[in-house]
Amino acid sequence: MKNLKRLLVCCFTLWIGMTVLSAQSLESIEPGKKWLDTKGEHINAHGGGVLFYEGKYYWYGENRPERGFTTKVGVEVYSSTDLMNWTDEGVALAVSEENGHDIERGCIMERPKVVYNDKTKKFVMLFHLELKGKGYAAARVGFAVSDTPTGPFRFIRSLRPNAGQWPKDFSEKDIKKAKKLNPSDYKEWWTPQWRKAVNTGLLLARDVPGGQMSRDMTVYVDDDGKAYHIYSAEENLTLNIAELTDDYLDYTGDFIRIAPGGHNEAPTIFKRNGMYWMITSGCTGWDPNEARMFTSSSIWGPWEQLPSPFVGEHSEKTFYSQGTYILKVHGTEDTFIFMADRWYPRSLKNSRYVWLPISFKEDGTPEIRWHDSWSLK
Ligand code: GAL
């Protein structure tokens, strides 16, 4: 009896201890460490993005399983007022149980980004979608909407962007040249001839009829309310920036290509003092590589490529992470956070987050340094 009492007291103390620990409020961001939500669970919102709405931040990301690479649950959403302590708000967009549905359980939903449309008062989610059982061949973008930030979001459709359209900076002559190219004449990749053909529009032209491939992606809303979908097209060889319609649910048809053949993934973007900055990764799957940076004074380019903004030890591997979003902290002019994933392909659910502050050189060029721990206060 005494022993049982002791055991019960022990269990109770342990339970209280665990509750206190898990409810402990975080005072800093520790890149690469397990990041516990307010219930004490590691946050499951990978490849994510953050939206600020009416006093709260919402973090949307891939809910990934312990094992495996396909989507079993959907897009998860967390909320926070301080960017450190996050409450799990549940599944914002759930997979469908219907056979053959675009977002049927077992599809792959990646890199969701949610933006608020001031005109329609709707929350719009775009995400990279791969159809069930097709690996990464579908290369589509999915659209979903909701009246509230936490959802549930309603899936609208998936597609490949800009079917029938040519980039806005392509002249009639450029289109003619691109149309003449035939992928079967360039079976060997990475030769100088192949590079030239890709640049001229070998894969662009191939995909014009059905729409451009769309894999790693982000969405950017500019100061004037116009939104842009930025995605890896042409077998991940070329980035596209495509303007969305006023309701953010379709394309206006205006798009440009950035760094054709440059093999850029994981696009992230922000604007500061009238300059746009884009930070991307190379293409090595779940393995980290060196980030790239581009800048332009107009969203429509020309985009100039600069060296990686990462400095210090392991900067050549982007501190073992891959970007997913750049967040401008609400109410600040100059506080930007580079959000990245440190992928654990053996257990994607347990992948870590690497959030780092962006600093600026005197000439305005962004720089990102490692911090074991940092805070916004
Ligand atoms: C990465 C990409 C991830 C995921 C992964 C699959 O390059 O950034 O979002 O698609 O490949 O291998």
Image (spheres, grey):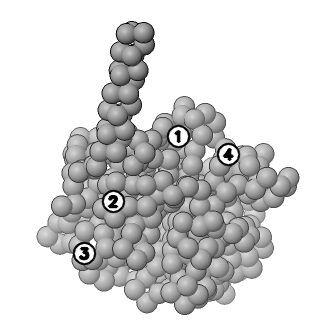
Q: For this rendering, which residue is in front, 16 or 63? A: 16
Q: Dot 3 lies on which element?
A: loop
Q: Which residue occupies 63% across, 65% down?
A: 152
Circle 1 Cα neighbour tier, 10 Å, few/some/many (<14 / 14–19 / ≥20) = many
Of marks 2 and 1, which one's residue comes earlier in the chain?
A: 2
Identify which amino acid the numbered label 2 is placed on: Leu
Of marks 4 and 3, which one's residue comes earlier in the chain?
A: 4
Give how far across and how far down residue 98 sits, in percent: 83, 55
Asked whether residue 372 appears in the rendered view, the answer is yes
Q: For this rendering, which residue is in front, 342 or 57? A: 57
Label 1 belongs to which residue?
349
Q: Which residue occupies 20% across, 66% down?
A: 360
Q: How far apart are marks 2 and 1 (CA)?
A: 20 Å
Of marks 3 and 1, which one's residue comes earlier in the chain?
A: 3
Q: Distance between the residues labelled 1 and 4?
A: 11 Å
Q: Do the residues labelled 1 and 4 touch (CB within 8 Å)?
A: no
**Mark drawn on residue 83:** 2
Label 4 belongs to which residue?
72
Hey, which residue is sitting farthest front in the picture?
1
Identify which amino acid the numbered label 3 is placed on: Thr
